Image (cartoon, rainbow, N blue to C red):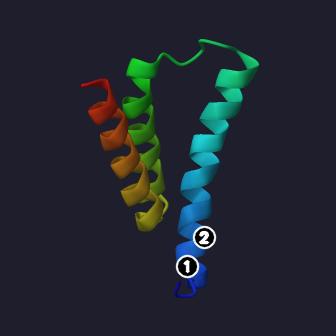
Amino acid sequence: MPELRTEEVEQIEAAARVVLGLLRLQTLQSGAVPLSDLPQLLLAAAEERHRNGDFGAERMLCEWADMLRDWEG
């Protein structure tokens, strides 16, 4: 496996923090985030990452939102 560049690692960490934050919220307050809302929340987080110049994190969050929508359908 090729070694990841520091910037790529930072982008992965930024996206992971968003997802782990949602997981933490869901764990602390079961049902706080309906499954049908998760894709939209990830897209909103992706917009925020874009504004911060975290384009890799933005891309991952958008891809994960797409995955969730595919699972629902």
Residue type pointed to by label 2: Glu
Residue closest to the eye, 19 or 73: 73
What percent of the width, then of the height, locates residue 58?
A: 41, 56
**What residue lies at 46% left-to-right and 49% top-to-bottom?**
48
- Which three-letter amino acid code belongs to the residue tagged 1? Glu
Horizontal arrangement in the rendering, residue 48 relative to residue 18 (left or right): left
Residue 63 placement (x, y as % from top left) = 34, 51
**Mark 1, secondary structure of its residue:** helix
Q: Position of residue 41 (x, y in %)?
A: 44, 32
Q: Quadrant of residue 35?
A: top left
Residue position marked by numbered label 2 in the rendering: 10
- Residue neighbourhood size for the residue with mark 1, other residues' Cα within 10 Å, grouped as few (<14), some (14–19), many (≥20): few
The residue that mark 1 highlights is 7
How far apart marks 1 and 2 lie (CA) works out to 5 Å
Q: Residue at x 33, y 31 (%)?
A: 71
Residue 42 x, y percent position in the rendering: 44, 39
Q: Nearer the viewer, residue 37 or 52?
A: 37
Q: Kindly identify the residue that appears in the image at 57 percent across and 87 percent down.
A: 3
Callout 2 secondary element: helix
- Which label is found at residue 44? none
Tags 1 and 2 in contact by the CB under 8 Å rule? yes
Residue visible at 54% across and 54% down in the picture: 15
